[in-house]
Amino acid sequence: MSVSTSPQVVLDKFWANKVDSVVQGLAQLRQQLDAIDEIPQHIIFVSAGEVKPLLNPDIAAFCQSIRDDFSGEIDFISAACTSLHASILHFNHSEAISCFVLFLELDEPIQQGCLDSLGIGLLNDHQHESSPANSGLSVKNSVGFCLLRKKDPLPQDLVIAQCHIFSQPKGIPGMQQLLKQLVPYLTYATSPEKVVAFDISSSWSTQLKLALTHHLRQRAHIVSWLASFETDHHHYLSLKPIFELQNYYQHLQKNTLSLLTLGGGGRVGYLTISTQHRLNSSIDNASFDDCNLDQDTAIYAHSIDVSQYSTPDYHAMVKANLKYPRLQYRGLNNHYFRWQYRGFSHAGIKQ
């Protein structure tokens, strides 16, 4: 057993919950934050829908209230449903030693518009008869947070031992190239390990699981799988791994816990949590694009206006403005998107 004498990235606190509405979710998140007697050095807002949820006036007001009460740096970070991983990568290479990550997976119509624009939303009822059971995703409101620290870990601390965002290259060989990167992480473990499955209700998830199972059988390797949090069409975007940590926390007493998460644009998030000094942090370098908050929210606001007249045109505008599906990022591992948040100049819009 090796005990590190240098600071590690630790998941100090985490919480997630399903909610019925935006207002309820923001109230619960505020209550959770108020119960923590600490001001972090950095705050990250997260949404798989990038900055599109800021069109909701309640979400915009919540973010502005955080900005008004906090003098430090605030960023919006996104990499589709691997946005937790992106936040960890961003924090790891920042100078901050503490960070709140606030997950705003709220406003189902706004979020669903992103999935529908990419053709991965739940299909309309009249299409179901000829479609497979796993034909799409239906966003459900959820909210959460985590507190990240850099510290010398105690035995009970949840050390983030691994954090990667793998990106499937474009083209027919892309999935095989992705698996060549992913499989070694599943077949080489230095301590007893449980792995949470990435399954979601999408055709890509089904195809990737079949291909991964084949690769593991070829190597005669048995993975100790735990079930995915998502078992039907309901989709919780970037909060899936936080819900799974809540469900499987007890396994960390005797095992390391690895969580697999699929993200749009061919991404697979791989996160390993360790306790009892089993593993030290080993987090890769990362890269990001700086994006323009006002410009992107203005385009999304215009898309909402267009949606009243043409759903196809609305979806086309949303798809064109989303960063994560763009082909130029295929095959680029550990890459994400940042919007520096200094306040929000546009009024929120309710659909």
Image: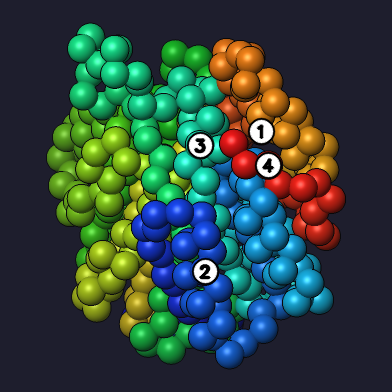
Q: Is residue 140 visible?
A: yes
Tag 1 or tag 3, which sits nearer the N-term? 3
Is the residue marked by circle 2 packed among few (<14), some (14-19), or many (20+) residues within 10 Å?
few
Q: In which quarter of the view is residue 44 placed?
A: bottom right
Q: Amino acid at mark 4?
A: Ile
Task: Please report the residue visible at 80 percent of the width from the left and 53 percent of the height from the top.
Answer: 344
Alpha-carbon distance for marks 2 and 3? 20 Å
Marker disc for residue 349:
4
Marker disc for residue 27:
2
Q: Amino acid at mark 1?
A: Lys
Name the mark nearer the viewer: 1 or 4: 4
Q: Quadrant of the C terminus?
A: top right
Alpha-carbon distance for marks 1 and 2? 29 Å
Alpha-carbon distance for marks 3 and 1? 19 Å
Q: Secondary structure at mark 3?
A: helix
Q: Which residue is mark 1?
A: 323
